[in-house]
Image (cartoon, rainbow, N blue to C red):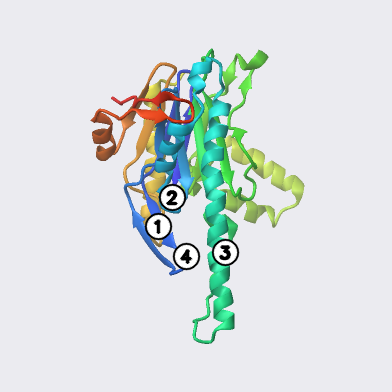
Amino acid sequence: MTLCVGITTSDGLILAADSMTELHDPLTSSSKFYPNAEKIFELPNLSMAAMTYGLGAVGRQSIGNLIDEWTEKRPVFEKSGSYAVSDVAASLAEFIFSRHRKFRENMKADIEQRQREALSNPNVAASDLEYNDTDWTTGLIVGGYQPESYFPWLYAIEEPARKDIPVGLTCVRNHEGDAGMDGPEPGIDYWGEAAALDRVYRGCDPSLLLDMAALMPPDAVNKLEAMLRRHRWGVLFDGMPLKDAADLAKFMLDVGCNFGRFSEGSPRVGGDAEVVVVTRTRTYWPYRKPIGAALAAVQPRVLASPANGADTAKGTGST
């Protein structure tokens, strides 16, 4: 799994993620954890970045590789001079999840074929494998700036969506005021293995509230929820400088990773924390794995766009 954090401020957007990934082969039930996965990606030529959780790869292609392929084939949004972050997010999501759906279909077919062989051939060992769609849940977060917008936009999609998760691409923080001119309310959002963050930021693990609610009448549950809201961690996001917002994202990642590290069982989050800051004019990385920084320092290749007959991307670099 993954822990992803997004912090929206009036001056920029912070995206942060851990680096742990689990590779799992359902047909052999083998798995392996690696602590150096890439989960945050700049979108070249756009003041945007993407972040992913769930599956680190779709078949033999990593999510990063899929984003590279999409970058070469995507519409040249920037040539129109008028596009929305939602347009970019929808295009990227459709590209990734169309492959993701096909991958899930193939996995389901493979598992069902193995089960049929076990039933029809006594020489084939019986399989206890079952296909569960939510075992392959993957999330994508895309955020940044669009032309003539002085505030960041943040969108998320999860597929297949788990319980209580909106279906389809959704705006994480709606912009307020006339035509959204007042921008979104600053604040923090997070996805993935977030139990520790709920305890720190919201003051309670949601599962505890559900357990207590099962023993209480509805009016008492409402009072309990109101009481818990008073015990939320008070963080003043209005006017928070970008460096402090980046440090807060890093702190939340550290909390989640160390919670997983010292909990029973193998940690599902961990590795180096990576944090990217996206503003209207630049993108930079306050925290980045050494290999990511080294690769960014290399002169990037130009990614040609065969579909549009134009160069669409040059690496933006980092500082």
Which quadrant holds residue 264? bottom left
Dot 3: few (<14), some (14–19), or many (≥20) neighbours within 10 Å?
few
Pointer 1 and pointer 2: residues touching (CB < 8 Å)?
Answer: yes
Position of 231 with respect to 258 (left or right) is: right
- Name the mark on residue 109: 3
Q: Are marks 1 and 4 in contact (CB under 8 Å)?
A: no
Disc 2 target residue: 57
Residue 171, image x and y in percent?
A: 60, 31
Disc 3 residue type (three-letter): Ala
Please, what is the three-letter code of the amino acid marked with disc 2?
A: Ala
Judge whether 302 appears above or below 227 on screen: above
Inter-mark Cα distance, 3 to 1: 20 Å
Distance Cα–Cα, label 4 vs label 2: 14 Å
Q: From the viewer's perspective, is the residue at label 1 or at label 2 nearer? A: 2
Q: Does label 1 or label 2 sit earlier along the sequence?
A: 1
Disc marking residue 26: 4
Quadrant of the drawing holding the C terminus:
top left
The residue nearer to you, when weighing 174 against 235, is 174
Amino acid at pointer 4: Pro
Residue drawn where x is 69% and y is 57% of the image? 215
Disc 1 versus disc 4: distance between alpha carbons?
Answer: 10 Å
Between the residue at mark 2 and the residue at mark 3, the CA separation in whole angstroms equals: 19 Å
Q: Residue at 53% of width from left, 66% of height from top?
A: 110
Q: Are marks 4 and 2 in contact (CB under 8 Å)?
A: no
Question: What crowding class fits label 1: few (fewer than 14 Cα within 10 Å), some (14-19), or many (20 or more)?
Answer: few
Mark 4 and mark 3 lie on one chain; the one further toward the N terminus is 4
Say which of 156 and 74 sits in front.
Answer: 74
Image marks 3 and 1: residues in contact by CB distance under 8 Å? no
Q: Secondary structure at mark 2?
A: strand
Dot 4 and dot 3 residues touching (CB under 8 Å)? no
Say whether disc 4 or disc 2 marks the residue closer to the N-terminus: 4
